[in-house]
Image: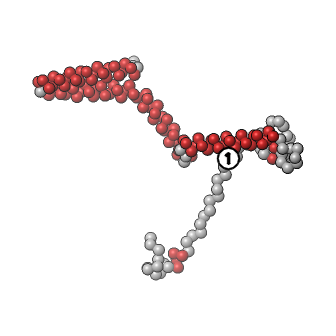
Amino acid sequence: MILEKKKLLALADRWDKKARNAEARYQESGDQRHLREKENTEDIADALRMAANAEEDYSELVVKRARLAAYEATGMTPAEIATLKKERDAAVRDLEALMGAGMDGDGETSECDFCKLGQEAICTKPYCVPEWRGPQEPEQVIAPADQSAGAYADNPVLAPAT
């Protein structure tokens, strides 16, 4: 049997009321059993509240896991990904506008220069196929090994610290 959140919270309130009553009895009599009853009923009320909020907590956890997976995969935050997508979409729109303008008439540039099929393929105008190629990654430059350490290796004063 699955209880709705509203019913679970109502049950938690009832257990809180029982805890308050047990505390009042403890204050009147000083009997330890009333204190234990108060603590146990408070624990039950807390457990009911946790159960009521479990679905929301689980949904939030799923969203956080997805964000973490996206960050681990790309190394970018959701805001950075959104900015990149906006820039990409703007570039694609510019490219499509350029291809749609059809600069064939002036003899300088053709929209076929931007088509992934290229000029060698049979042209299927007006159904050009633009292809997003994305930002190019910069080439990694590997610095040459530091040769100066070997020159000072024999001299403890001039040798680099390790």
Q: Position of residue 74 (x, y in %)?
A: 56, 46
User: Which quarter of the figure has residue 56?
Assistant: top left
The local crowd at label 1, few if under 14, some if 14 to 19, many if 20 or more residues have their Cα within 10 Å, is few
User: Which quarter of the figure has residue 52?
Assistant: top left
In the image shown, does 108 or 44 lie closer to the viewer? 108
Q: Is residue 154 above or below residue 85?
A: below
Q: Position of residue 33 (x, y in %)?
A: 16, 26
- At 26% across and 27% down in the image, what residue appears? 42
Residue bearing the label numbered 1: 134
User: Which quarter of the figure has residue 122?
Assistant: top right
Relative to residue 74, is residue 92 drawn left or right?
A: right
Q: Is residue 117 visible?
A: no
Q: Position of residue 1 (x, y in %)?
A: 39, 18
- At 47% across and 74% down in the image, what residue appears? 160
Q: Is residue 135 visible?
A: yes
Relative to residue 33, is residue 2 drawn left or right?
A: right
Q: Is residue 89 above or below residue 2?
A: below
> Can you say which quadrant of the picture contains the C terminus?
bottom left
Residue that extends furthest to the bottom in the rendered view of this protein: 155
Q: Is residue 160 above or below residue 29?
A: below
For the rendered model, the colour scheme is: secondary structure
Q: Position of residue 123 (x, y in %)?
A: 85, 40
- At 40% across and 20% down in the image, what residue appears? 4
- At 59% across and 69% down in the image, what residue appears? 144
Task: Determine the secondary structure under disc 1.
Answer: loop
